[in-house]
Amino acid sequence: MIMKQFIQLTYAVLVSTLISCGGGGENAEVETPVIGYTTKDLSNPFFNIIGDTLKAEATKHGYEVIVVDGGDRAETQDKQIDDFISRKVKAIVVSPCDSKSVAASIRKANKAGIPVFTVDLACTDETAEIVSHVETDNYGGGKLAGDAMVKAIGTVGGKVLILHLATADSCVQRVTGFTEVIEAHNAKNGSAKIVISETLPGGGNQQDSKKSTAAFVQGNKDLRAIFAINDPSALGAYAALKQAGMEGGVTIVGFDGEKAGKQAIKDGKIFADPIQYPDEMARITMDSILKYIDGRKPERVIKIPAKLYYKEDADKDPELK
Amino acid sequence: MKKIFQSRIVSEFGTLLVLLLLFAYFTVATWRVIHPVTDEAAREVAGKISSQNSSARVLIAVRGGGGEQPFAEELKASLEQAGCHVIAVESGSPADFSATLQKLGEQNQTVHFIAATFEASANGVLRPEPGKAGDHTLPGLQQRHPSLAGATVVVPESYESSQFLTRGNVLNIANHISYTAIIAIGMTLVIITAGIDLSVGSLMAFAAVTTAWMIEHWGGAADATAIGMICCCVGGLGLCGLFGAFSGVMITAFRIPAFICTLGVMMIARGLAHTIAPRENISVDAAGFDWLGSQSTLFGVPNPVMLMILLFIGAHILMTRTTLGRYIYAVGGNAEAARLSGVPVKWVLIFVYALCGLLAGVAGIINASLFGNGNPRFGEGEELQVIAAVVVGGTSLAGGEGRILGTLIGALIIAVIYSGMNQTGVGEHMQKVVFGLLILAAVLLDQLKKRGLKQTT
């Protein structure tokens, strides 16, 4: 019996050691200053590009960047920011999972005196202090999406579905810009009105957007077009249309211009994207961090204009060769 | 009998041992140079300065946000006691400090020493970076302003230690797991009765959203009083308890398998939460609402951790010292035998599910309080984390056995692994692999233990 217990104990030790080895990080012998980046959702390539570019830029200046996946949950992100604070990182970069809830986490970093930078998605709560925020001009980008939509179906009009992500302030602005252009178009063209017949949550991801679209097209076979607030969402919409056999008749306008999205534009699955420049956003963020550390004041909000990207652009794009 | 008892002790120590080993491992893995900001460090810096020049003019620089403020105050008091003159305490951004220093230079004020915390000295003008000149370096400023020429930067002595095994970080880890662990109490009871409750994650969201909704509509929104808020919280909790009891009734009265029944409730509660909060979030702006989730009342221990400890003590007493506790074990061990010996099996089951729902509600309100809003997306996937904590803690999914304190240890193991991996920079995907291995190891351990028991008894 005692032998058995001994074996059990040894086993426990063994297992834990194995686990420890599996999770073993490199020993921090050299004190490279660390910057922590918690992303909204690493299943979206957009945030991977920001993370990778941040890493590359930081290495040039002697910093190390830890990128973690917020998994689209405010709770996870809160824990990650706590861990960054415990680790005493130089700066925290956040792409909030929830523009409002993140404020509680950012206030903790403020209290610890660690500067916080947001990229792509803003924190909408003013009580949380942000040193600098970099984003695409989402409102302008939304207008561009509206322009593309008018270009595609402006002469005939018809029903439009919006796949939204209302928790993200950036997406709210995109939809606002989009809606304004559509309304302006409708005011001028009484005969070919573009009717935004429904705004459904698409979660900003492929799966949920596919579900929402599939449910919607069940009862709306006359759907003319879809505006999806990002590329995963647009691709999800396409998958649902294809399943319903409607992919030929419905125009999709996306947003982002990440590689899969550009490829889809080249293949004619998506009509156009206002494209963003995540690598540029990361570079500017790193620049702001360096400015802050240097004792200068970076700009509070930096907006990067989006640009429309059509099939002609995709055909010439060296990235897709 | 005695042998089984002994084996239980051993297996309990087994999980505890794993926890301690993990702590030890991450303590070593996060061993690095520590730059203290304690009162002691402040006195050390003051002593160093006053021993060199007992009437020195000192500028103090700490980081903003208030975290290093006690250091600055202690330093100021010690310096003044020693006869030195403190020109100013600067606790803003690096840019603010640079501006202050420049102003002092322009006013031709002599600065003998700049006493700073390490973090403050690592940014802005104080940053030692060779080969760089100009306005944004100390040498640059000293060249332009002769009154600053003699200024030396003094920081506290650093030493090597672990960042992991500090009071702050341990509390941090406990805080991270608090709401998962609180639900895990209820889940342990449910699993001991050989059931399962998949609805807990959704009930978290449901409690958060309904409480936030009630505060907004009935409690007086931003002007809500403490009593009003407590009533709304009790309302939210009550609804969750009812949901739990509903599951219990469905399971006992209609013999619906717990898995299916709570799966249904999981969807219902999540759907209702989204219906009540169609714009994703219901903000709670009432002052004091953050008391439960993000403040500390006793000994600097965060309130969720305090609540977690109290609930665990209560649950431990319930399971080890009361008739109801023995009933719960009996129902899980053999429901039919329990019924024949006079245990009110149905009521026990309804109680267990109601309690589990209630505790999920507590967790939801903690989250609402922490984030200042009721979010229908709270607790997505939380049920799996909770079940994992219970299983790692040594409770058997077959029912009839399990310990409340084991669950606490299980929850802590998970929290330590996550936090430790975050702090040592282990990638997100690897974390999932490790987490999966952990669950498998725990179940394997459980099986080996059982086999060992069978062979020896």
Image: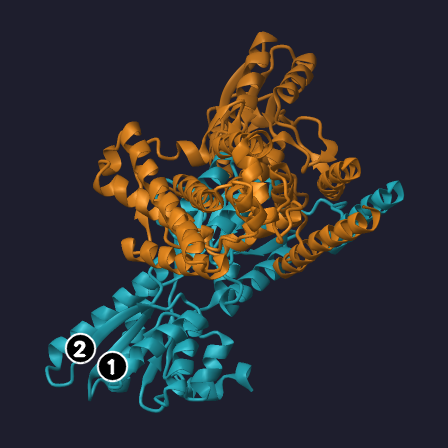
Chain colours: A cyan, B orange
The Cα atoms of the two marked residues, 2 and 1, are separated by 7 Å
Where is residue A171? Give x, y as percent. Answer: 35, 63
Mark 1 surroundings within 10 Å by alpha-carbon count, few (fewer than 14), some (14 through 19), many (20 or more): some
Above/below status of A292 relative to B147: below
Label 2 neighbourhood size at 10 Å, few (<14), some (14-19), many (20+)? some
Task: Tell which subunit mark 1 falls on.
Answer: A
Instruction: Quickly name the residue at label 2.
Output: A185
Q: Where's residue B341, x and y in %?
A: 56, 41
Q: Amino acid at mark 2?
A: His
First reached walking from the N terminus: tag 2 or tag 1: 1
* Chain holding disc 2: A
Per the image, label 2 sits on a secondary structure element best described as helix
Q: Are marks 2 and 1 in contact (CB under 8 Å)?
A: yes
Q: Give the answer, above or below, for where B60 lies relative to A6.
A: above
Give amino acid for label 1. Val
Task: Please give left or right for residue A126 compared with residue B370 in the image.
Answer: left
Residue holding disc 1: A150
Q: Nearer the viewer, residue A172 or B287?
A: B287
